[in-house]
Amino acid sequence: MARAKANTYHHGNLRQALIRAAITLIERDGAAAELSLREVASTAGVSQAAPYAHFSDKRALLAAVAEVGFTRLAASMRQGVRPSSSPAQRFLATGRGYVQFAVRSPGMFRLMFGANLGGLADFPDLQAKADTAYGLFVEALDAVTTSTKPGDMTALRLSTWSLIHGLASLLVEQRLPVDRKRAQELVESVTEFHLRQVTAH
């Protein structure tokens, strides 16, 4: 079976098979730091040397996995946005999608924002995917804060992102003293409260 898989991967699917295997292991174990290329190769059903055909080391593989993560994050942030939504509704839907992605894919979320990747500048494609996801957040926030002074926008964006990301992290690490359903309600109420503060005149 492994040999048949290897023959298939030889025709162009090896890279994607390795990424899928790494995602499976990260979501199962939730610890990218303990992931090994040997384990990824075994899960994908290929030889231990196979990963080096596409990835120079584990960090390069993790960067490719994180690319998938940021693509999925962006899709989750877009999912609840409707053309007829008001700016406030679009912002809340974007934040909701951010948190929902984190809860659905905790291992991936930890990898994307953890220390294992190091600086994203080493991986331009990954940086571009991360920038796209952050750009969706910025676009939604800017649409509801049109009266904010330009000099205050950076601080506003960072503080609001920190709020949403912090709530997502607390949910992922199960540090909110409420069950999953109540936690989602708490995220909604906190985000709405923050939105009222930043849009108050």
Image (cartoon, grey):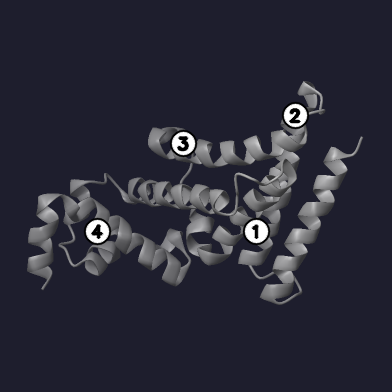
Task: Point out the tag, 1 or 2, that comes first from the N-terminus.
Answer: 2
Neighbor class of circle 4 (other Cα within 10 Å; few <14, some 14-19, many 20+) is: many
Cα separation, mark 4 vs mark 1, equals: 29 Å
The residue most toward the right is: 201
Compared with residue 40, is residue 15 higher up or lower down, i.e. above or below?
above
Cα separation, mark 1 vs mark 2, equals: 22 Å
Cα separation, mark 4 vs mark 2, equals: 42 Å
Looking at the image, which residue is at 60% across and 49% down? Answer: 81
Secondary structure at numbered mark 4: helix
Q: Is residue 26 left or right of residue 136?
A: left
Residue 153 numbered mark, or none: 2
Could you tell me residue 78's position as x and y percent? 55, 48
Compared with residue 88, is residue 174 higher up or lower down, i.e. above or below?
below
Amino acid tagged 1: Ala
Task: Point out the tag, 2 or 3, that comes first from the N-terminus.
Answer: 3
Task: Point out the tag, 4 or 3, that comes first from the N-terminus.
Answer: 4
Neighbor class of circle 2 (other Cα within 10 Å; few <14, some 14-19, many 20+) is: some
The residue most toward the front is: 84
Looking at the image, which residue is at 54% across and 53% down? Answer: 79
Q: Is residue 134 visible?
A: yes
Secondary structure at numbered mark 3: helix
* Among the 4 quarters of the image, the one containing residue 1: bottom left
Task: Point out the tag, 1 or 3, that comes first from the N-terminus.
Answer: 3
| Mark 1 lies on residue | 168
Cα separation, mark 1 vs mark 3, equals: 21 Å
Task: Point out the tag, 4 or 1, that comes first from the N-terminus.
Answer: 4
Secondary structure at numbered mark 2: helix
Cα separation, mark 2 vs mark 3, equals: 22 Å
- Marks 1 & 3, CB-CB < 8 Å contact: no
- Marks 4 & 2, CB-CB < 8 Å contact: no
| Mark 4 lies on residue | 17
| Mark 3 lies on residue | 127
